[in-house]
Image: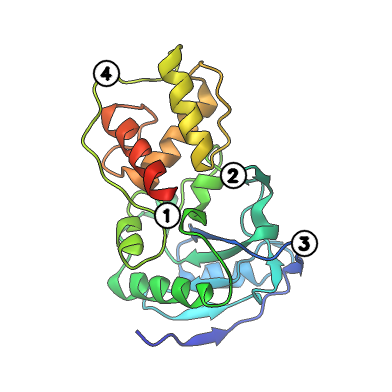
Amino acid sequence: MTLTIIDAPSPNFDARTKVPDMIVLHYTGMQTGEAALARLCDPEARVSSHYLVEEDGRVFRLVAEERRAWHAGVSFWKGEEGVNHASIGIEIVNPGHEFGYRAFPESQVAAVIALVADIRTRWEIEDSRIIGHSDVAPARKQDPGELFPWKRLAEAGHGVWAEADPAPGEPLSEGAEGVGVFALQAGLTRLGYDCAPTGKFDQNTREVVLAFQRHWVQTRFDGVADGLTRARLMAVLRAAS
């Protein structure tokens, strides 16, 4: 599709401290796109993103890619804390889980794919660093959520997707301990999450598993590492390597 950018400058940005090498996708989580755009441009809100994609496919540019937008907050990916300095943030209009989460329209998905492709012509961004807000902040966020078509994005050449048959073994859930939990945490850490291996399935591990499921499983998102979740993790790690 032809990408048309509408400038809607936000005052909420500052200087970068690193060349961007990551794209973080969000949903707006507000009742309308107009309300979301207004908030992202409100100096008192102190939040912003580089782009906002409306449900009809319109793309608004709020902050220049060379500047740091304030979209991810407290966050972590692949050893980096506070990923705003290293990322380009894309807000996707959707009411979110609070206001009636729904599927993303075709025109919007096509625009997101075109926008990501366009951004990657200017910056070196690996597929494994095209992620969601919930991936970098699993304890706080769940966007863009289990309805976002990550597989479609990857099939268009942007991001990582892999499928696998369920692995044998009992599901791992909060309170479990042992080698299996350690291996699960090590795999999640290797992928990028903040999930240091301890061998104890704690609340943080549950939140990270849930974030992984929203991105790479999507048929199950309960924070329980069943055979399908563990098999997908291994497959995603192979695809991302």
Task: Note whether 136 is above or below 117 in the view shown.
Answer: above
Q: Which mark is residue 78?
A: 2
What residue would you read off at disc 1?
Answer: 96
The residue that appears at 43% across and 26% down in the rendered structure is 184
Other-residue count near label 1 (Cα within 10 Å), few / some / many at <14 / 14–19 / ≥20: many
- Amino acid on which the number 1 mark rests in the picture: Gly
Secondary element under disc 2, as helix, strand or loop, is: loop
Which quadrant of the view contains residue 125? bottom right
Determine the CA span between mark 2 and mark 4.
Answer: 28 Å
Q: Position of residue 81 (x, y in %)?
A: 68, 45
Q: Nearer the viewer, mark 4 or mark 1?
A: 4
What residue would you read off at disc 3?
Answer: 17
Task: Note whether 38 is above or below 197 in the view shown.
Answer: below
Determine the CA span between mark 1 and mark 2.
Answer: 26 Å
What residue would you read off at disc 4?
Answer: 169
- Amino acid on which the number 3 mark rests in the picture: Thr
230 and 48: which is toward the camera: 230
